[in-house]
Image (cartoon, grey):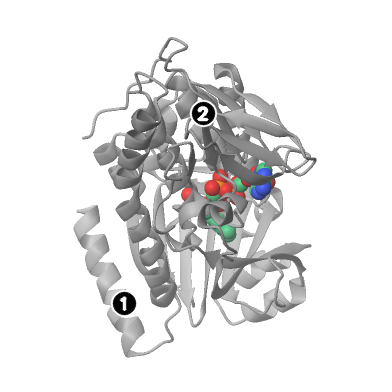
Amino acid sequence: MAPRPKVMEKLTRDDASKLDIVIVGAGLGGLGAAIALLLAGHCVHILEGASQIGEVGAGIQVLPNSSRVLISWGMEQALESYATKPKQANMLGWKGNYISHMDFHKYEQECGTPFWDFHRANLHKCLLDRAVELGAVLEVNARVVDVVTAVDERTADVVMQNGTRRTADLVVGADGINSKCREILLGKEDPPILTGDLAYRLLLKTEDMMKDPQLRGFVEDPQVNYWMGPDAHAVNYVLRGGELFNMVLLVPDDMPAGASTLAGNVEEMRALYKDWDPRIPKLLNLCQSVDKWRLCIRPTLEPSWSHPSGAFTTLGDAVHATLPYLASGAGMSLEDGHVLGLCLSRLTSKAPAEKKKALAIYEECRRSRTERIVQRGNVQQHLYHVHDGPKQRERDELLRAFGAREND
Ligand code: FAD
């Protein structure tokens, strides 16, 4: 069994090596980076473009690699009160036939850290509270439109929409999939790439499900369920210890050009799943309204995640947004912040050469792992969505063999 992670102590450092860092974006990645950089002894100011801090969307799965990071940041106690710990993940055919499962308790034994499911708002609030507790300063209504690096390479200025500027020793672009920072670094427009899929995301009240003997089991015995069918799949799991039920339905993208989120039509959504495992139409009948989200990706940022000056870098979805089919995008953002914090914890001065070296090591540690996740997300898209026939049977055999090996 892997050891439990140690809770990190906040480093103290003198002014000669203490960086003034501006983080662009207060999403899960930006807040995680704030915690890691504050623990490394630096000062952090976060600029958030939205007028309110928070997370949209519903549930989020946190795998043991990411819970390890969160626990090392001293957040276990705060998070445990909101976490649901599912027993296992079940892989099912679209008619509800069992194919295989992954035993999460066994993974926890091996990894030393748990598999958690959260409502996004709870995870986000816990990260925000920890960042503020460690000294982060947060500014909302602060949309960044430019980052200008100084000729002497020592600093960079962030320029906000209202014209104000802020100078930093390091700017960290954590502004998500539609990242302005990525475009600034590249010096050109760079829209995300369409994947051909969209997600319906919905939350159900479990009290409605408890009235139906066929649905009650989902609440009483928390597990993650994946149904895989032709051109579509569905995922569900319980949140907040049984209070809410999260469903994500992944289907072909029919959204108009340029849209990223739209109110969905419940009847249209139900029609797509009417012939699936009868429990899915039953669950969808409990849904009153739904949003749909276009799913895009970002292949890794080339040639580098950072500006040559060493005064501007990037992380999270801004660099490597992936399909959510491995439940790993936020986990990758949190890992990025953790590694960035570790690299910048070694600084002995603010000299550009030291920062450049730290950022080069950060990128070297993160690039291939995150590239692999983006590629694997695309592979999952094909595996989950194959039509019934020889390919589906081959996939199911592989899943059975994987389950037998892993759960042994
Ligand atoms: P974001 O969360 O997008 O945060 C970016 C922030 O920057 C926002 O607050 C935004 O307002 C702000 N911002 C943007 N532009 C500017 C600007 N110019 N100036 C100032 N601020 C700005 N991941 C998992 O690990 N597990 C899961 O189970 C999971 N499920 C998912 C399900 C779905 C349907 C989807 C779509 C994604 C899922 N993900 C999951 C992925 C995860 O949501 C993302 O990878 C993660 O939220 C990325 O975090 P981020 O901080 O990089 O970006």
Circles 1 and 2: CB atoms closer than 8 Å: no
Q: Quadrant of residue 345?
A: top left
Furthest residue toward front: 151
Q: Which residue is mark 2?
A: 169
Callout 2, which amino acid? Asp
The front one of 55 and 249 is 55
x and y percent of residue 312 in the render? 50, 40
Q: Is mark 1 within 8 Å of ligand 1?
A: no
Q: Position of residue 25 (x, y in %)?
A: 62, 41
Residue 241 image label: none
Task: Answer left or right for 290 relative to 120.
Answer: right
198, 322: nearer the viewer:
322
Q: Which mark is residue 395?
A: 1
Q: Is residue 179 above or below residue 233?
A: above
The relative height of residue 163 versus residue 323 in the rendered view (above or below) is above
Disc 2 crowd rating (10 Å Cα; few below 14, some 14-19, many 20+) is: many
Q: In the figure, is residue 95 to the left or right of 99?
A: right
Res. 81 visible in picture: no
* Residue 366 position (above or below residue 355): below
Left or right relative to 280: residue 153: left
- In terms of secondary structure, where does tag 1 sit? helix
Q: Position of residue 9 (x, y in %)?
A: 39, 15
Q: Label 2, secondary structure: give it.
A: loop
Please state which of residues 370 and 54 is positioned toward the viewer in this rendering: 370
Looking at the image, tell me whether mark 1 or mark 2 is earlier in sequence order. Answer: 2
Q: Is residue 222 left or right of residue 292?
A: left
* Residue positioned 46% across, 18% down in the render: 18
Residue in the image at 36% along x and 59% along y: 371
Other residues around mark 1 within 10 Å, as few (<14) / some (14–19) / many (≥20)? some
